[in-house]
Image (spheres, rainbow, N blue to C red):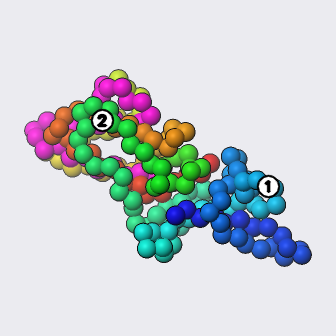
């Protein structure tokens, strides 16, 4: 569950509120008003405890990453991040793990519309022959918080975990 922290004034005293109500589209106030200033969001884990995190320069970083996808799709496959990120997050901080299990390099593409492995949009990732590689980067999301990913061959696997998100 995602929670949002707001501050507002009661009789001249700053008061904090934790709510499941998302901020407005500008991420300035609580939706529906202008009295509760939005500060930040956080997420709870599967048993209701606050997930360990820290904020750094407008980015939420999770200590325990969230696994999103793993596999070797040779056709573009859409992946939704809804449920992994707050609805207002615009950028996911992700870590890609790639492996090539043969004596040839592996290629994957990840992004909003990777129509094919060679010329599609998004970020292209490479891994050497018979090797493993990991890389952390920012992934811009579509309005629906989804992305596509594709691998050049079934011998190239690609796993993606969420390390955090950026709201602005």
Residue mark closest to the camera, 1 vs 2: 1
Whole-percent x, y for residue 117 in the image: 30, 28
Q: Is residue 105 visible?
A: no
Left/right placement of residue 23 relative to residue 48 reads: right
For this rendering, which residue is in front, 133 or 84?
Answer: 84
The part of the image, by quadrant, that contains residue 23 is: bottom right
Q: Residues within 10 Å of mark 1 (few under 14, many from 20)?
A: few
Residue at coordinates 45% horizontally, 41% vertically from top-left?
A: 146
Within the magenta stretch, is there residue 102?
yes
Q: Is residue 122 above or below residue 83?
A: above
For this rendering, which residue is in front, 11 or 61?
Answer: 11
The extreme top residue here reads 119
Q: Which residue is mark 1?
A: 33
- Structural distance between the alpha carbons of marks 1 and 2: 42 Å
Q: Is residue 150 above or below residue 164?
A: above
What number is the disc on residue 150?
2
Q: Bounds of the magenta span? A: 93-118
Which of the marked residues, 1 or 2, is nearer the chain's N terminus?
A: 1
């Amino acid at each position: 569950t995602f929670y949002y922290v707001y501050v507002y004034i009661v009789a001249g005293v700053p008061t904090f509120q934790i709510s499941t109500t998302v901020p407005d589209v500008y991420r300035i106030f609580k939706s529906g008003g202008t009295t509760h200033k939005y500060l930040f969001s956080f997420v709870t884990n599967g048993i209701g405890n606050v997930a360990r995190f820290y904020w750094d320069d407008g980015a939420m970083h999770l200590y325990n990453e969230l696994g999103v996808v793993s596999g070797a799709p040779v056709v573009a496959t859409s992946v939704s991040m809804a449920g992994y990120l707050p609805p207002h997050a615009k950028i996911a901080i992700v870590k890609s793990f790639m492996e090539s299990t043969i004596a040839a390099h592996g290629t994957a593409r990840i992004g909003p519309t990777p129509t094919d492995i060679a010329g599609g949009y998004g970020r292209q990732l490479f891994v050497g022959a018979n090797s493993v590689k990991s890389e952390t980067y920012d992934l811009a999301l579509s309005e629906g918080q989804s992305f596509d990913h594709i691998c050049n061959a079934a011998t190239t696997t690609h796993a993606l975990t969420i390390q955090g998100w950026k709201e602005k």
